[in-house]
Amino acid sequence: MPVPLSRSARVRALIALALSLSVVTGCVSSGSDSQDSRKGQNGPGISNSTIKIGFVVPNPKTAAGGTGFVDGESGDAKVQVLALVKYVNEQGGLAGREIDPVIRVVDSATDSVQQENAVCTGFTEEDKVFAVVLTGIREVSARSCFAQANTLMIDAGSSPLSGSEFSELKPYLWAPSFTPVENYAQTLATGLRQQDFFGPDVKVGALIESERTLDEAFSTYMKPIIEAAGVKEITTATFDTSSPGTQGSSAGAAVNGFKARGVNRVIFLGRPDMAGFFTSIAAPQLYAPRLSIGTFDVPNFIRLNPTYYPPAALKGAVGVGFAPSIDDISGGFPAKGSESKCVNIYTLANQEFAERSDAQRALLYCDAVLFLQAAMKKVDAKGPLNAYSFATGAHSLGRTWQAASSLETEFNEGVYAPATSARLLKYVNGKFIYQGTKLGMALS
């Protein structure tokens, strides 16, 4: 009987299969000859005067994930994208070329494998863009589709990506506002321990998204810290993302399983809506274990939606955060530096935000576009412009470019998600607030 592949092995196998299929279909193969060929020629979407950049923007009617959710006064995504394009073009464009924006509206309420792959096909085969700023594209097959087409992906979503995903898709996949899930997982476990989340009498439950490498991030980077804190019993459950139905049923199974085992601490590792599925099912059963809530759970969205995240279920919740607009609305807004720069760009387009969390999506878009601008300034405009020359420029940025969305960022060779600092996070009086000083967020 064959031995079943681990989830991470399945992810790697799917990516390898998708890339290898390009040989059969007549696309450029992923071997060393192909890589040398790609390095020596321009990427798609480039002319002598323009460079095509694609943007995924949400359907405003379902931008919060569906009817009934509240997402703040986030403004008009199309207007925000065009404001950023105007700003960069007035600053000389990308490698001396004006951005030619291609905007596609994607409905998060109808998200599916087919829809996400259709988004890739549209951008790469019809529009032939050089790079695409992505939100809500989670499927491995969709990401590998962009890589096959030699198209850069600048991820402006808020779902965690693993180090193996960046490695398998390099130099195409970038997340300039975020950190790999392994870094986050280790920092989260460390921060939870500092906030007395663990102990000898604690039973931990971990709800982990399926079909990703997140289970390995938990077992390698979180579990040893939890066990070192004296926890004797750890129960894991899988959040099945196959469909809305399986998401609800797997969350329900986790609630029932954790409750039966007396779990009194719950950690989430995966897509942002996992905590909402869990609390909306657990709360009516009067099951209220203490929760771990961090950046990838989108604390400010939780704050705005008490129907799905009842305050009683959040009592005592703690975690870590690295992205102020996602985590914590307190403090002066806009802060000096990158946050203020992005807000000023939007103000010129009559896009204003009452508080930091309203600007979350806009700041992620801003990070994506200004990261493209900063990296392209490091590229020889007369040489080949492609994912490889872009990567050389991006990795040379060091600390000279800072994301508006995250506390601190630093690029170096091999870094595709540069957020490097976090802070402890605590639920207090209906909102999440930062505590203490910054924590380093790199693997030790």
Image (cartoon, helix red, strand yellow):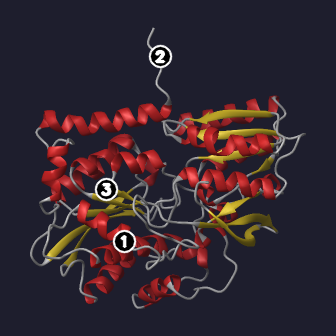
The residue drawn where x is 12% and y is 79% is 49
In the displayed structure, does residue 392 sit left or right of residue 352?
A: left
Say which of 314 and 218 sits in front: 218
Find the distance from the CA under tag 3 to the CA under tag 2.
32 Å
Q: Which dot marks residue 178? A: none
Tell me the kind of residue under disc 3: Tyr
Task: Name above or below for residue 58 compared with residue 291.
Answer: below
Tell me the kind of residue under disc 1: Ser
**Which residue corresponds to mark 1?**
396
Sooner in the amino-acid sequence: mark 3 or mark 2:
2
**Which residue corresponds to mark 2?**
3
Say which of 272 and 218 sits in front: 218
- Depth check, mark 1 against mark 2: the one in front is 1
Looking at the image, do the residues carrying marks 1 and 2 touch, with CB atoms under 8 Å apart?
Answer: no
Q: Which dot marks residue 172? A: 3
Disc 3: CA contacts within 10 A as few (<14), some (14-19) or many (>=20): many
Secondary element type, mark 2: loop
Sooner in the amino-acid sequence: mark 1 or mark 2:
2
The residue drawn where x is 49% and y is 48% is 162
The N terminus appears in which quarter of the rendering?
top left
